Structure formats: structure tokens, C-alpha cells
Image (cartoon, helix red, strand yellow):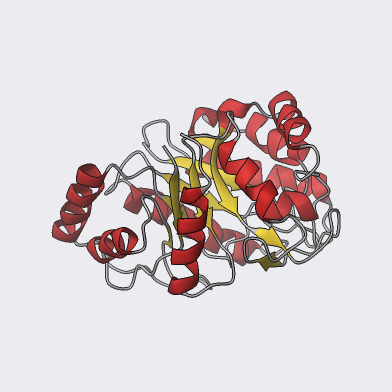
Amino acid sequence: MLYIGCHLSYSKGYEAMGNQALAIGANTFAFFTRNPRGGSAKKIDDSDVQKFINIKNEHGFGKLVAHAPYTMNLCSIDKDVRFFAKKVMSEDLVRMESTPNNYYNFHPGSHVKQGTDIGIELISQQLNEIISPNQSTIVLLETMSGKGSEIGRNFEELGEIINRVEFNDKLGVCLDTCHVWDGGYDIVNNLDGVLDEFNRVIGLDRLKAIHLNDSLNPCGSHKDRHAKIGCGYIGEKALINVINHPALKNLPFILETPNDIDGYINEIKLLRENYIE
């Protein structure tokens, strides 16, 4: 089963997102838990949630991939920024229990000249204070392109964070095709090798979701600029190979390409036409 979708707006609630997903041919989607730049979160309406769950169950949706705000930096040099990040994630994980057993994806953070080791330690400490053994939501660390002082530029950095968290059965990884390509992993010519490396360092059982994006930059550029499917250096053929890879089938694939809704409709249609059951 191909579970494919894109980012949808949470402004009108869960039911509206479910109906919009159906309208564009999607059977999963991503949404920001609050404004991507931070701020307060929209109040959850239990009736709205139940209507969405009915849609999800009736139409066989895959797992949702909620996204934390971009401003959330668990390893900031600024204590207030770290406090904000911890508060946001803690609140979001409570809110996620209204739609249990889904995913919460976040960018690990930027160490801002503190160094990678300190960044990894700060992220791990924060996660140890946030993650509960009783939560149903799996928290996903996203693979990053390595621009600036980002943590998560390679599999080893993500693996080190996971290894330092006590309840790491609640942790997984979201692999962004643009990010790993820009980070130096050649998924065009050596997808099997990249996945073998992921399995060696982290374990494929930890890979829970895919952000499916083309890239405006060559492999190893460390720039993180997404492109529409087939309009970048990764290319349509390689991304079709990603959705059809045996190790990745049945994962939720989330498009984060620079598109409007009509563009997403076309990309979802293209990918469905090239998916091998």
C-alpha cells in the first residue's frame, strides 16, 4: 500500500484535513502542531477529532506525521530558547494523544557554535526529560542536510542521540530525501547502499516516515533547497525507486515540495501511477 500525502493546514481542524486529504488522493498527511514559527496551539475539539478518526478508519489512512515548529531548538545556546522548545514538545506530545499511535517529527536543532558533541548532549537531555514510557506517539528525528550548525547531518549523529535516550523505543527517524542527498548520501546511484548504512548505524526498524522531495542542489551541497518531483538533481526516476524500495514500502511518504494543492494532486497521481503493488 502506498501511503502518500503532503502538508495540510490545521487551521480548520482534523476533519477538514481528512476531507482535504481524500479530495487530493492522499491517505496520510503532515500538519504543523502550531504555527511553524512557534506560538500557541489551536484548541483541540474532541468532536472534530472523532469525525477525523472515522474518516481515517473508513478510508484506511496510514499514520500521520505531525511536524513541530521550526523555531523549536532543543540544543540552543540560549537557555530560554531551550526552555521554549521543551515546553512546546511536552505540550504537543500531550495533544498528540487525542489521535494516538501517530508520529511527531522535529528538526533536532542547531548547536550554534557550541559544537556537535554539546548539541547532541543537550538534545538527549531534553528528550530524556520529555519522553514518557506511556506515550503512544513515536517522536521522529529528521535527517538534516548539514547546513550551518545543524545536528543530524549524518546517521551517526542521530544514532548517538537515540542511544542516549532512556525510553528510546519511543524514538524513530524521518528520512528526508532532499536532506540526505544534500548531506552527501547518494540515493540516486546507491539507494541500497544508503539504506544499508542507515541499517548499520541506526537500524531500519527505526525508519518510520519519508519526506519525499527533490533537491535544487547537487549531492553533498549541504544547502537544503527542495524541488518539485522531477525538477531537481535527484529526479523523478530515483524518487519512484524510493517509494518502491522493499525496505520502505508501507511507510508514510510526505511531500514537502514547493507546490500549491494542484501541484500536490499531480505529484500524488504521478507517484500512484508508478507504484508497484
Residue at the image point whose x is 58% and y is 29% from the top: 246
Residue furthest to the left: 47
Considering the image in quadrants, where does the N terminus appear? top left
- Splitting the image into 4 quarters, where does residue 51 fall? bottom left
Closer-to-camera residue (57/161):
57
Query: What residue is at 33 percent from the left and 73 percent from the top?
Result: 11
Q: In this view, does 188 lie to the left or right of 37?
A: right
- Residue in the foreground of this view, choosing between 159 and 196: 196
Please give left or right for residue 255 compared with residue 95 in the image.
right
Residue 204 makes an appearance in the image: yes
Image position, residue 29 (x, y; %): 41, 55
Looking at the image, is 205 positioned above or below residue 63? above
Q: Can residue 87 be seen in this view?
A: no
x then y, percent, for residue 53 = 22, 48
Q: Which residue is the extreme one toward the front? A: 273
Residue 27 % position (x, y): 36, 50
- On the picture, is 176 further left or further right than 215? left
User: Does 260 sit above or below residue 267?
Assistant: below
Residue at horizontal 57 percent and vertical 62 percent from the top: 72
Q: Where residue 237 sits: x, y (%)?
A: 67, 49
Total labels drawn: 0
